[in-house]
Amino acid sequence: MKHVVVLTGAGMSAESGIATFRDSGGLWEQYKIEDVATPEGFARNPQLVLDFYNQRRKDAFVARPNEGHIGLAQMEAEYKMSIITQNVDDLHERAGSSRVLHLHGELAKVRSTANPGLIYELTPDKAEIHLGDKAEDGSQLRPHIVWFGEAVPMIEEAMNIVQTADILVVIGTSLNVYPAAGLLQYAPTRTPVYLIDPNEVRTSQSYVHFIRKGASEGVRELRRLLRNAL
Ligand code: APR
C-alpha cells in the first residue's frame, strides 16, 4: 500500500464551522496572539487565556467532521494513511482516521502547569477549566496546547513520518508557522505533493499539484487523481 502523509491546518475544519486564523475574520483578527497563545499571556491574564480556549473547545465539541475529514478516513481502505495536523480539534479522529498526530496539542485535553505529563481529558459536559482548577500535583490546569515560543514535542515524530511518504498531501494551511511548515522539506526527493486550498499558498516545494478547492471538494478530486495516477 502506498503511504499517503497528510498535513492539515485550520482550513481543513473551516467547512465544519471552525474559524481559521489568518483568513479574513480569522481568530488572529479578533484576538492578539501574545494575549491568548503565549506563556507570557497566560502568566499576565490566565483567565482570559482559559476563557479563549474554553470557547474554542465548546465550538469544537459541537462541530462535526466535514466531507474532507470523512474522505481522508475512507482512504484508509486504499492507502496507508498518516495525518499530521496543526489543528487542535478532534474532527479527524471523529471522522474515523486512526493515525492522527497533533503537532500543536489538543483542545479536549488539559494538563498540569508544573508537570506536562499530567494530562486530563475534558468532555462536552465538562468542557471548561477555570482559575483554581488544579491537577493532582496541586498546580493550576492549563490547555494542552503548544503556544508560540513553546517547544513542539511531536515534531521529530512528524519528520520521521514525512520521510516515509510516497505521496504528500497538504490541506488548509497557509504554511506560515514553523516548524510545521518546514515538514515538507523532509519528504523524499520527487515525492508528489497535492496542495488543497481555495486560495493561493506560496511554497518553494517542487512537484506540487495545486487543487484550488475547499477541503471537501478537494479531497474528492484528490481521490480521483490518485486512482488515475497509481
Ligand atoms: N478548505 C481548505 N482550506 C481552506 C478553506 C477550506 N474551506 N478555507 C480556508 N482555507 C485555507 C486558507 O486559504 C489558508 O491557506 O486554510 C488556510 C488557513 O491558514 P491559517 O489560518 O494560517 O491556519 P494554519 O495554517 O492552520 O495556521 C497554522 O498557526 O496560529 C497558529 O497554532 C496555530 O496551528 C495554527 C498555525
Image: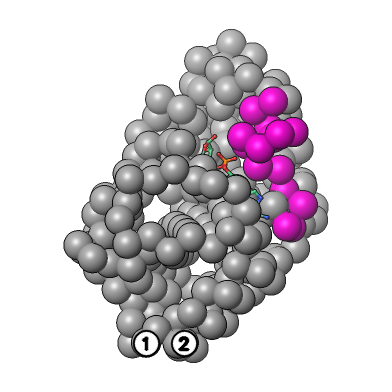
Amino acid identity at mark 1: Leu
Q: Residue at x 53, y 80 (%)?
A: 223
In screen coordinates, is 194 left or right of 19? Answer: left
Secondary element under disc 1, as helix, strand or loop, is: loop
Residue 38 lies, with reference to residue 163, above or below; the image says above
Q: Sort mark 1 into few (<14), some (14-19) or many (20+) by Cα contacts within 10 Å.
A: few
Residue 140 lies, with reference to residue 76, above or below; the image says above
> Which disc, if any, is residue 230?
1
Instruction: Look at the magenta stretch and give its main secondary structure.
Output: loop
In screen coordinates, is 77 left or right of 178? Answer: right
The magenta region covers: 15-29
Place of residue 41 in the rendered image (x, y in percent of width and height, measured from the top left): 56, 17
Residue 222 lies, with reference to residue 120, above or below; the image says below
Q: Quadrant of ligand 1?
A: top right
Badge 2 residue CB within 8 Å of ligand 1: no
Which corner quadrant holds the C terminus? bottom left
> Label 2: which residue?
227
Place of residue 194 in the rendered image (x, y in percent of width and height, measured from the top left): 44, 64
Place of residue 145 in the rendered image (x, y in percent of width and height, measured from the top left): 52, 39
In screen coordinates, is 1 left or right of 226? Answer: left
Query: Marks 2 and 1: in contact by CB < 8 Å?
Result: yes
Q: Residue at x 62, y 54 (%)?
A: 198
Residue 99, can we see it?
A: yes
Q: Residue at x 26, y 60 (%)?
A: 187
Can residue 77 be found in the magenta stretch? no
Place of residue 185 in the rendered image (x, y in percent of width and height, measured from the top left): 26, 51
Amino acid identity at mark 2: Arg
